[in-house]
Image: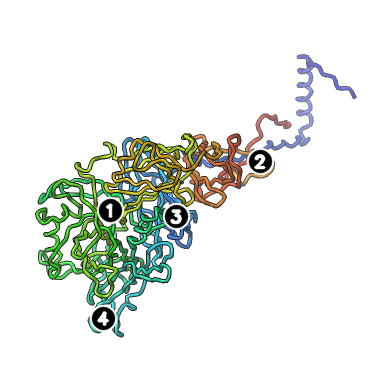
Amino acid sequence: MEIHKFKLTQLAIALGLTATLAACSSDNDKTPPPIEPTPTQKVVELPAGTTSEKQAGFFTVVVKDSEGNSLGSADVPITVKITKNSANVVSTKGEALTADDLTITNGAGLFAASLSELTAETSITVNFTAPGYFNNSKVITLSVDDSEVAETVTLVSRSIDADNVAIVSEEKSVNDLAENGATVTFKEDGSLETSDGSALKLAKTVTKTNGSATSDKGGVQISIPSGSKMLAKNEAGELVPLTSAPSLAVAYFNNEASSSAAANDNNESRPESALDYFPGGLDLAVSVPTADNVTTEVTTTGSFTTAGFVAIELTDDAGNKVKEFGSTGDGDNATKNSIEVKMQVEVKTSNACPMTYADLDNLDQATVAAFAVDASKSTDSAYFRKGACVSSDGSAIATRQIKAGDIIPVWSYDADEAQWAFESYGVAQVNADNADVFDVAVQVTHLSYWNLDFFNWREPNFGQCGDDRKVQFDIKYADGSTDNVTAFDLLVESQSGGYRKLKRGYEFRYYNKSTIANPPSFSVFMSLLNNGTNIIDGIEGDANNPVDASASRLKLNDICELDGKKLVLTLDTAPARVDQKIKTQYACSNNAEGDVEAPPAATSTYAYLIDSSNNYVTYSYTANDGTATFSNVVEGDYKVRVWDQVSRTYVTSPDFAASATNEVVIDLPIECTITEKPVTGTGTTGGS
């Protein structure tokens, strides 16, 4: 049948309308046709507030154990605490940090946060705590020019005897610390008493085997007098007894003086060291009096060279930690009770501030302290000012090997607050049973990390590395090229041992230049490690560190010498590299076929590039449109791990080959809202 198109005349319309009205009026019993339902469709929409905007600054911390494994799981969560300069620290979503943000259970060992404002250099202290591990912390410094920073922190197990590093630790119930069959009673006031009045003791020693010879490399002995009170602090800061008898956890970290000397002789760099686990790092800022016999202090940056350090924790079943041991006497006459900590120091340890105390029959701590700060009693031009090494005549202080009678400053580190404090002075004493070590005994009134350290700082007579306290240098290949320099780990070690700074490759953003902030004031060795092997040839135009086509560590009497120089690698040319683009976006995961899908929404978050061996390579903070570029990536297979700020989990992409022409898009799956809505753009029909 042929269909004809035509126009209705006004007459036809009028006649039709009349007929319809007539039919309705004459046939009132007739049922009108049903009204057809309005067509609908399922519309999928992203929840409001899903995406995030890029903040002014960003930092991330990789948390590992001593074996290099990532920490932080549902079974062993990591608790994070911002202890200094937290005012502008927010989540990567730009919101106030919550308890969930400050708990790592994702298994990847990654923590990240942002800064809502960043107008000047800011240093943020972040503390990490996990069940079964000793606390540790990291100081993270950001600036307008360096607003995205990556760091690494290592937590040491409370039970370890590591083969790769000179660390040993153990945890025991106090009931197992009594000697000669004595029993231990824990009282309601927190007191620990032994049946025969003897002290509770625990000793740990680092022992290493070289060939067929086995020798002690130092250790620690803890002695807790009977009657000592186990007092923790509640939320109000009040001292209260523990709720149960505690366990004692002790970890001793050797300064690896012997292995350091061997490495120096052989021009080798140790891939791992106990010094890498030093709480907060060996570069730090402390308050030092501006002159002798004054109370005015100035905060100054410097570096520790350590003679060894120990972590001590007494913890009850509820997780409360002992802070103090009570006191004897009342009011102004009250004296804090103490326990004895005796550390053994290798005789090969270097003394960076050689001041000798001769009266070894009188080791009263107050007497030793008065001697240590008296410039007129300086030896080798060295004396102390609140634990900091000072030159009595303005000359540089020469390092020498430690000897009996040497004064060693004792520092404490509150692992809960990430706070360093000078405590007292110890004296090296001959160990009658072991000629390989000296004993340094101190009375401690609270628990923390306890460190035998020399704090060396850049007084004006030692010179400065510029007003910004930084050493900056360029890096190039043997053929002269500076682009696409290979990834490396930066390692700086004291020439005499006791200091080490390791910056891992994924913590760098650029590989053709490097910066050392707050450089140490003493002579150092420096290496660039590529897969654990040093790749430095020398410094261009430097007679002391010549470019001679052979690998060697840099030997720098003053690291400021490196500022503005060009460091040449042994590698001939750069490997083939590409700039890999990525994009992060949220995509609905619960839509069905036929639904009106919501388009993916770009989001700013942080992403790590991971190589085929599952190692972190580099990181980036994606822009508001979700895009970022991993620059100078060596050709090969990778995957990207992205933080999902909504589910607080990580999404890892499939493996891909790095390519300058392909953008890797990482969809962050999210459950979206699905609603029934009228189909738009259609008409409706109905009857009268």
Which residue is at the front of the view, 454 or 252?
454
Looking at the rendered structure, the kind of residue marked 2 is Asp
Q: Position of residue 523 (x, y in %)?
A: 29, 48
* Alpha carbon separation for disc pair 3 and 4: 40 Å
Image depth: mark 1 or mark 4 in front: 1
Residue of label 1: 304
Q: Is residue 461 left or right of residue 27?
A: left
Kindly identify which residue carries mark 3: 104
Q: Which mark is residue 595?
A: 2
Q: Which residue corresponds to the image point at 39% horizontal and 68% vertical from the top-left? A: 208
Q: Earlier in the sequence, mark 1 or mark 4?
A: 4
The amino acid on which the numbered mark 3 sits, given as a three-letter code, is Ile
Name the mark nearer the viewer: 1 or 2.
Answer: 1
**Quadrant that contains the N terminus:** top right
- Name the amino acid, label 4: Thr
Amino acid carrying label 1: it is Phe
Which is more toward the observer, 434 or 582? 434
Residue 370 appears left or right of 563:
left
Q: Earlier in the sequence, mark 3 or mark 4?
A: 3
* Mark closer to the observer (3, 1): 1
The tag on residue 194 is: 4
Q: Tell me the tag on residue 342.
A: none
- Report the residue at 77% width, 25% height from top: 20
